[in-house]
Amino acid sequence: MTTMPDQSNHPKVGLFVTCLADMFRPSVAFATVKLLEAAGCQVEVPEKQTCCGQPAYNSGDRATTAEIARQTIEAFDGYEYVVGPSGSCIGMLHYYPDLFEQNDPWKIRALDLKARAFEITQFLTDIVNFDQIVAQYEGTITYHDSCSGLRQLGVKQQPRQLLSKVDNLTLNEMEEAETCCGFGGTFCVKYPDISNRMVSNKTQYISDSGADTLVGGDLGCLLNMAGKLKREGKSIQARHVVEILAGMTDTPAIGEAEYELAKAL
């Protein structure tokens, strides 16, 4: 059943852009804004936001992570919701309360931020009950469930529910869609051989699905798998789910423009 957004309510949303969208794929941030505004939200992008702190957290640098957390908490003060196109980065915001002692005033503020922070497909389906997707995609996709979105935030059916509204799109599920791609932030740096084995398995499952496009909700995973697909000579494209949901697929797929440029040099 199609659900109309409550036009009398325009929640104020702070967009958590994420580093990878900012530096490698700005179209993901613009597509996220388009979807949020279609859902009736007032969207702002706080300038004080930086990295979520995940690289420091994964490296055991708790002090730096706490410093970043305090800045992020202040940057998103006053917003009813904080929404980002990444289960991984939003998941990091959910770890913030663990960085502060029980009697530290920042713990209460971190818990408040956690309660307001959502991955984009989770926010659209579970919070504002939006499904008025106006988009079409001529092709067959397969969907990768990223670890943080799936295991930490419970994002599984939400992107598939929204993708089912895209005209002409066919979804072929791959084997082991929920298995890690081997990126894992600093994991791929610490354990490159294991990481390469994992992404090799993943690209085989993607290829076996018969899809022409790999879709996911985290740019880290998508960049990792898109690079491996290219190195293997496979012609499968990779796109973030919001680009398809927002009907913004007129730009080259992830890594395509850079790959063509590198071949020309």
Image (cartoon, rainbow, N blue to C red):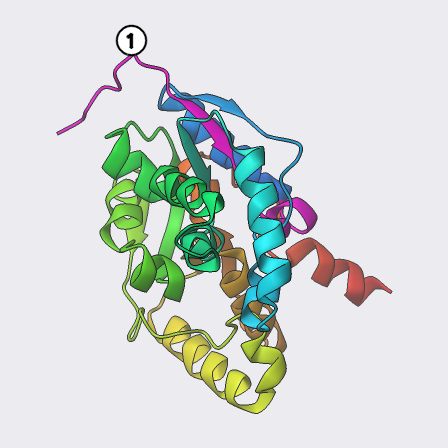
Name which quarter of the figure residue 140 lies in: bottom left
Q: Is residue 152 visible?
A: yes
x and y percentages locating residue 79 in the rendered image:
46, 26
The number of callouts visible is 1
Of all residues, the one furthest to the bottom in this rendering is 193
- Three-letter amino acid code at disc 1? Ser
Q: Quadrant of residue 143?
A: bottom left
Q: Position of residue 202 (x, y in %)?
A: 42, 77
Q: Is residue 212 magenta?
A: no
Nearest the eye: 30 or 41 = 41
The answer to whether residue 17 of the structure is visible from this angle is: no
Where residue 186 appears, as percent x and y from the top left, is 59, 74
Magenta segment's dominant SS is loop
139 to 152, vertically: above or below? above
**Residue assigned mark 1:** 8
Secondary element at tag 1: loop
- The residue located at (37%, 20%) in the rendering is 11
